[in-house]
Image: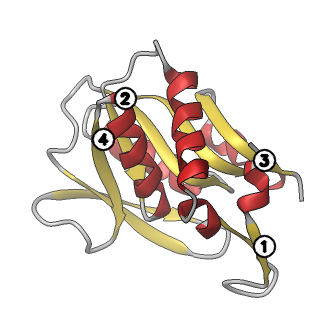
């Protein structure tokens, strides 16, 4: 499947200088979604993970679909103020803004092996912050799955030495 054909680009969004990769057409296509979930499932088959963490906001969509396919639980990593109950949070930076991510304090059991899923790997800020939150709760991140990777922003260097699966890469 030519998954790249489902990605639209919007120049100067959300601010001048940003070339936004829009994955909305993927979400409208059951075939594209099935392909993504199948690719992630195949790649991580046999690898040790107990639960899947989805990063807000589009990462949650892919994480929940993937979790259903592999019959694993799914936890949410969300932006500030979106989760009830006791939470842990962390400040982080993006290519065009800063923010705060949160996770419910009881989302991870100490020692659980976690796979992080998000739609996009850009600068690596969200991925690193998500990992740090999971580790704060005693979880062990075993890898990452992304639909799109922007190679030119070098997010892999920020994440470090983890098992990373991406399906579409952009060099510019």
Q: Nearer the viewer, mark 2 or mark 1?
A: 2
Query: Would you say the residues marked 2 and 3 are in contact, meaning their CB atoms lie under 8 Å apart?
Result: no
Alpha carbon separation for disc pair 4 and 1? 36 Å
Q: Earlier in the sequence, mark 4 or mark 2?
A: 2
Applied colour scheme: secondary structure
**Image point (62%, 48%), residue name:** 147
Earlier along the polypeptide chain: callout 3 or callout 4?
3
In the rendered image, the quadrant that contains the N terminus is: top right
Measured Cα–Cα span from mark 2 to mark 1? 31 Å
The quarter holding residue 55 reads: bottom left
Q: Are the residues flagged by discs 4 and 1 in contact, CB closer than 8 Å?
A: no
Q: Does label 2 or label 3 sit earlier along the sequence?
A: 3
Q: Name the spot of residue 142 as percent of width and height, x first.
A: 46, 25
Front of the two marks 3 and 4: 3
The residue furthest top is 46
Helix, strand or loop at label 3? It is: loop
| Number of dots carrying numbers | 4
Q: Is residue 22 left or right of residue 107?
A: right
Of the 4 image quadrants, the one containing the C terminus is bottom right
First of labels 3, 1 by sequence position? 3
- To which residue does mark 2 refer? 70
Above or below 149: residue 112: above
Mark 2 to mark 3: distance in Å? 24 Å
Q: Residue at x 65, y 44 (%)?
A: 158
User: Mark 4 or mark 2: which is in front?
Assistant: 2
Q: Could you tell me how far apart the alpha carbons at marks 3 and 1 are, in whole angstroms?
A: 16 Å
Read off the residue under disc 4: 136
Labelled disc at residue 9: 1
Please give the residue where the numbered disc 3 appears in the rendered image.
Answer: 2
């Amino acid at each position: 499947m030519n998954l790249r054909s489902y990605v639209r680009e919007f120049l100067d969004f959300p601010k001048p200088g940003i070339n936004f990769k829009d994955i909305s057409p993927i979400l409208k296509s059951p075939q594209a979604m099935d392909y993504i979930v199948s690719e992630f499932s195949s790649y991580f088959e046999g690898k040790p993970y107990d639960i899947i963490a989805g990063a807000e906001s589009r990462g949650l969509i892919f994480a929940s679909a993937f979790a259903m396919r592999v019959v694993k639980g799914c936890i949410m990593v969300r932006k500030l103020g979106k989760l009830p109950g006791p939470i842990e949070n962390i400040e982080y930076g993006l290519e065009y803004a800063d923010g705060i991510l949160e996770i419910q304090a009881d989302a991870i059991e100490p020692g659980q092996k976690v796979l992080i899923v998000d739609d996009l790997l850009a600068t690596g800020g969200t991925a690193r912050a998500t990992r740090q939150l999971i580790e704060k709760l005693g979880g062990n991140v075993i890898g990452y799955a992304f639909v799109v990777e922007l190679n030119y922003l070098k997010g892999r260097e920020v994440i470090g030495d983890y098992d990373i699966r991406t399906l579409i890469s952009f060099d510019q």
